[in-house]
Image (cartoon, rainbow, N blue to C red):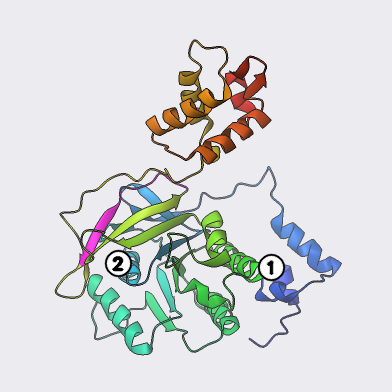
Amino acid sequence: MGRNKNNISEQSLKNGSPEIGMLGKNDFSEDELEAYLNQGEIKASDKPQVPPQILWVGDCTIATFGNFSASTGKAKSKKTFNISAMVAAAVTNSTILNYRASLPEGKRKVLYFDTEQSRYHCHNVVTRIYRLANLSMKREDKRIKFFGLREFTPTLRIALIDYALRTIDGIGLVIIDGLRDLMYDINNAKESTDVMTMLMAWTSKYDLHIHCVLHLNKNDNNTRGHIGTELENKAETVLVISKNKQDASISEVKPMHMRDKEFSSFAFHIDSNSLPVLDPGYHVTVVKPKDKPLTSLANEVHLTVLNQIFDGVKSVKYLELIDLMAKTYAKEGYQRGINGVKELLKVLKENHVITHDDNGYTFHPEKLANAK
């Protein structure tokens, strides 16, 4: 890249641009701090543009400029087939599989970085995208560029992605198929934070969207490592691709986390042409966030449940309250264990939503408006 990683160039300071070099720095000059502080200042008089939406499932937004998202799933769940359909839709601004794309003029290019597969298998992905998008194989389509980064180190992979984003104009969507390979240790907190920082810097600086791929753990349904936790906390959308339990040839796509409203899950299988197609026999259901802890539910949910429990009752004894809370939250679609109920009661008491005296526990609905 031709620059010392411990120095931020004067030009980048002048433009207020984030750099890879900031990740390797511990000390900053006052000029650098002033430049970064000015870059981060948000003024009431500013009129920032609403980030363009570029990708949907149905009427549910899954990708906007200035943000990043992710697909996750276990090995062989057909994650890359799903991404291929997403990219084909973005390249042609059309609907493919269940993805509807609309990249604005001047931001129609898609970059695809694969960190895991051989050149042969990467080429298979490229040709699959071309076939899904109905593009000619006789010439390269300028709207998509595919790069295989398998043989490079994590540090060099990050530098190459950064270089491509700096030197290629008109990029709207970036795919990083193998986010784990941008770091040496997926459980290293600093590395995880650095990678997340780069994703946020890239999407902000270049006004585009990045979609990443990360595996789930083999033994559970959690995203891998510390990087997985960071990704779930900061991503705009996280999709889960999994094999159907009754038919392993069918892959299901479900929302794990979305800032926008959640779409109904859908499924696809691979046809005789080795292309992903929607499975017409799949029963579509709306996925509710039932796996969230009770403490993270909206105040409106707590108000509904607690009003039922305390309807016509001034106070309730501890064991009865725990039992009623467990049953009533379950009736509302949030069935949890006793420990989860006890943890919620603890938080409600700390926020004085529920108080305790010699007569038992009392509910104060007016306090919910101020509860965290």
* Structural crowding at the residue carrying mark 2, measured as other residues with C-alpha within 10 Å and reported as few (<14), some (14–19) or many (≥20): many
- Of helix, strand and loop, which one carries label 1? helix
- Name the amino acid, label 1: Asn
Which mark, residue 15?
A: 1
- How many labels, in total? 2
Q: In the image, is residue 318 above or below residue 273? A: above
Q: In the image, is residue 49 above or below residue 230? A: above
Mark 2 and mark 1 lie on one chain; the one further toward the N terminus is: 1
Q: Is residue 74 magenta?
A: no
* Residue drawn at (34%, 48%) of the image: 263
**Rendered location of residue 274, percent (x, y):** 20, 75
Q: In the image, is residue 207 above or below residue 284? A: below
Q: Nearer the viewer, mark 2 or mark 1?
A: 2
Residue 83 visible in the displayed image: yes
* Secondary structure mostly seen in the magenta stretch: loop
**Rendered location of residue 192, percent (x, y):** 61, 68
Question: Splitting the image into 4 quarters, where does residue 96 fall?
Answer: bottom left
* Residue drawn at (68%, 42%) of the image: 44
Q: Check disc 2 and report the residue beneath it.
A: 85
**Rendered location of residue 71, percent (x, y):** 41, 63
Query: Which span is picked out in magenta?
Result: 259-269
